Image (cartoon, helix red, strand yellow):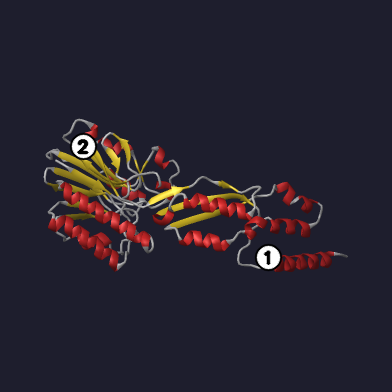
Amino acid sequence: MRIIHFADNHLGAGIDRREKDILDSFAEAIDRIIDLKPDLVINAGDLFHMVRPSNRVIAFASEQLLRLGRKAGIPTLIISGNHDAPKQKQIGAVLSIFKDFENIQVVYKSRYERIKIGDCAVSAVPHCLTTDILKSELDKIAPDEKAKYNILVLHGVVGGIKEFQMADLSEQEIKTSYFHRGFDYVALGHYHNFTCVEENVYYSGSTERLSQSESGHAKGFIEINPDKADLAERIVFHEVKSRVMIDLPVMKSEGKSADEIINQLERAVKEQKPEDKIVRIKVADISEETYRALPFDRIAELKKDAFSLDIRFEKKELPEENLYADLNLGRLDLAFEKFLDSKVVEHLDKDRLKQNALAYLRRAENEEEP
């Protein structure tokens, strides 16, 4: 028995070339899965990035699932995740499009379902409308004692693991106690990096990098061989091609001229050969005067030659006591000038803003005099 587990494909996410990256990585995953000829494929949620994807994205997904189910004849089960699940009862579920596809079964109705596929009994809980519904449905899950293999499929945050220490409090949480009800494998979706939660409980991760926090992680899917005793043979991760993301070290700009900063920036970026990579770099402690003197035409050229380049300029903060010292002496005009000088103001005439603001302050000061 061989099972494929993948998730978080987020078809329809991204713009232009990034959207194509996400679609291409999914198509490659389907190619690889078909070549492996598994007995069952499980998608643990967020096949789509949104409840209402574009017609083009739906057509693409349909083509890939027809290849998998009809042409290759591989039984496949898909549950909805938090991105592609309806947020209200009256909104139709995009996964319902595939309910009559050959060899494709979909679970999306905000309730627990147990489906028998060959020697497997798959207990599936999709993303639910509310936390209370999720808890009620999770309490129902149970393995099929007559099945040779029992698989549990869930989409959500596993409570208590380090990967979710900073999770949004509004996210639906899954207690690990549900994993210990006699299941041979638990297929999880929602977390985008391949992760072992505990023995036979895994997040497969996404099939393409979707945020900079995933830059150092491989993308792909899991092959499960439940009859194998050795872990290296029982759980095999298959990597698919994904867009390279690079976070460059923070560049300190204090004490450097605008020319020195742009020269260093160009060297750092060009060393990465950014034509086919997503590159991010932060320039820290830059003064307003230096920022305004930067040759932005060279920055534009640098970005034009890269696949995706994100340069973040972090303003040098003046000590608060210096910024507002004059305020304590009653000189609000001087305090305001220092405050304004400490900020980068784009697309506005700062000098004119300063003149108008000071005029208003002086007028208010004169009106208060006896």
Q: Position of residue 233 (x, y in %)?
A: 21, 35
The residue located at (39%, 44%) in the rendering is 216
Question: What amino acid type should be assigned to the residue bearing mark 2?
Answer: Asp
Which quadrant of the figure contains the C terminus?
Answer: bottom right
Q: Which quadrant of the structure image shows residue 337?
A: bottom right
Which one is in front, 247 or 76?
247
| Residue 108 seen anywhere in this rendered image of the structure | no
Q: Is residue 336 left or right of residue 28?
A: right
Name the mark on residue 184: 2
| Residue 125 seen anywhere in this rendered image of the structure | yes
User: Circle 1: is it few (<14), some (14-19), or many (20+) Cα within 10 Å?
Assistant: some
Q: Is residue 353 left or right of residue 155?
A: right
Question: What amino acid type should be assigned to the residue bearing mark 1?
Answer: Lys
Secondary element at image label 1? helix
Name the mark on residue 260: none
The residue located at (24%, 34%) in the rendering is 232
Q: Position of residue 144 (x, y in %)?
A: 16, 41
Residue that numbered label 1 is attached to: 350
User: Circle 2: is it few (<14), some (14-19), or many (20+) Cα within 10 Å?
Assistant: some
Q: Is residue 284 left or right of residue 139?
A: right
Q: Position of residue 94 (x, y in %)?
A: 27, 62
Question: Of the residues under marks 1 and 2, which one precedes in the sequence?
Answer: 2
The residue located at (59%, 49%) in the rendering is 284
Which one is in front, 250 or 14?
250
The residue located at (11%, 46%) in the rendering is 118
In the depicted structure, whether residue 367 falls above or below residue 280: below
